[in-house]
Amino acid sequence: MSYEFYKILHLIGLVTLFISLGALAYIPLEKRKPFMIIHGVSSLVMLVAGFGLLARLGMARDMGGWVYVKIAIWLALGATPVILKRKPQLAMPVTLISIALGALAAYTAILKPGA
């Protein structure tokens, strides 16, 4: 598949991930299940598409440091629903941290520091 295909798929995963995080932060616990599923599926889509992009860039074997930063951000955003379930009162700080992580991911993807 093409680079463009993986990039579009990655962006779709990104949008749905952040929509699900917003919903998980602010809807009642008993109504969260569909958004948990969306969060998991979008996380998987982002992971697969991200590695597809790396393969298309020819970086599958020699990943730069920026890739590890992106994986760490992916893991942190993946753990966010657990935090929101255990501590729903932290919705606003978790939302702001998620936005900051998204900005850091964008910066890292575009500028590829340490590549």
Image: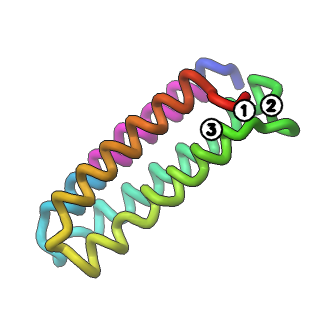
* Residue type pointed to by label 3: Gly
Residue at position x 39%, y 57% from top? 39
* Residue type pointed to by label 1: Leu
Residue at position x 18%, y 76% from top? 29
Cβ–Cβ under 8 Å for marks 2 and 1: yes
Which residues lie in the magenta part? 6-20
Position of the N terminus, as image quadrant, is top right
**First of labels 2, 1 by sequence position:** 1
Estimate the spatial distance between the alpha carbons at disc 3 and disc 2, rounded to whole Å: 11 Å
Describe the element under mark 3 as helix, strand or loop.
Answer: helix
Please tell me how crowded label 2 is: few (under 14), some (14-19), or many (20+) other residues with Cα within 10 Å: some
**First of labels 3, 2 by sequence position:** 3
> Is residue 86 or residue 112 the one in the foreground?
112
The mark found on residue 54 in the picture is 1
Describe the element under mark 2 as helix, strand or loop.
Answer: loop
* Residue type pointed to by label 2: Met
Per the picture, the main secondary structure of the magenta-coloured stretch is: helix
Which residue matches tag 3? 50
Q: Is residue 28 left or right of residue 72?
A: left
Q: Is residue 26 left or right of residue 80?
A: left
